[in-house]
Each structure stands twice: as structure tokens, then as C-alpha cells.
Amino acid sequence: MRLPILYGVSNTNLAVGAGAMKQKQKMGKGNYALAGHNMNNGKALFSPLTNAKEGMAGYLTGFKKIYEYKIDKVFIVKPEQIDVIDDANDKILTLVTCNYDGSKRMIIQAELVDTMEYDEKEGNKIFTNEW
């Protein structure tokens, strides 16, 4: 998935990318939580997360640093179970999307394993799957 990260989870934001779920969160710190729509087509927005597996890598960037995360949990919760995005001492990424019928939420959590300075050449390789 290659998506822009937008501030907030408005319908407009979620129609074009991932929405930051907490106002003051920062990449690489605490529990960085993002929400996105599952379009049930395997390709758009957060739909590819249905194929997420423990051990897979994911990358985020704000174009100053690149943050590498490794998925360590994939699970389903009720829509009202919002404790999965609570602040944490650990440096984790939490991705939230709907399950196939929208009745529950799929949660993917990953731990931060590396932080690199952003370099356009390396960044282009990582974010275009040439790495």
C-alpha cells in the first residue's frame, strides 16, 4: 500500500488515504494509529491489509525519517473497542480498518524496528517496492 497520511478521520480524508487517529501523535513515538477504509477489493485504500501477516514489514515517512515497522499482531475487535489505539510506552504502529462486512474492526499492530534518515534515492526504492 502506498497512501498519503492525512490529519483526522473525516470521510473526505478516508476516501483518499489513511487518517491519523490522534491529534498529537508522531511517527516513531508511542502508539501511532491510522485508520483507513477497506473497500473489499484487495487493492484500494486499506483493503490490502486483509493479507497482512505477522513478520511483514511496513514503512512510514514524513520525508525527514523513514520508520520501519514489523507486524506482530493481526486481530479483530468490536467497533467500540478503542483501547487498541491508546497511548503506549512501546513504539508501535496500529492500523485500523473494517472487516469484510463492516461489523467489526481489523487491527494490525507492528513494532518499530528501525529509523533511518530520509534519503530520496533510498526512499524511492522502499516506497516503490524496488528495495
Image: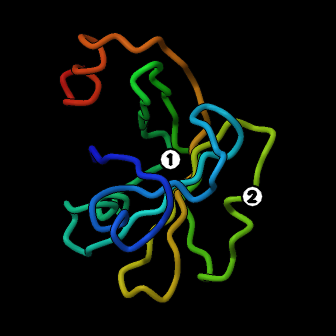
Mark 1: which secondary structure?
A: loop
Residue 89 in picture, x, y percent from top left: 81, 39
Q: Are marks 1 and 2 in contact (CB under 8 Å)?
A: no
Q: Nearer the viewer, residue 8 or 42?
A: 8
Place residue 15 in its image quadrant: bottom left
Task: Tell me if residue 32 comes above or below residue 49 in the rendering.
Answer: above
User: Mark 2 or mark 1, which is nearer the start of the sequence?
Assistant: 1
- Look at label 1 and name its amino acid: Glu
Pointer 1: residues within 10 angstroms few (<14), some, or many (20+)? few
Give the quadrant of the C terminus.
Answer: top left
Q: Residue at x 56, y 73 (%)?
A: 76
Which residue is situated farthest in the right direction here? 89
> Residue visible at 63% across and 56% down?
22
Residue tagged by mark 1? 54
Q: Position of residue 94 (x, y in %)?
A: 57, 52
Secondary structure, mark 2, is loop
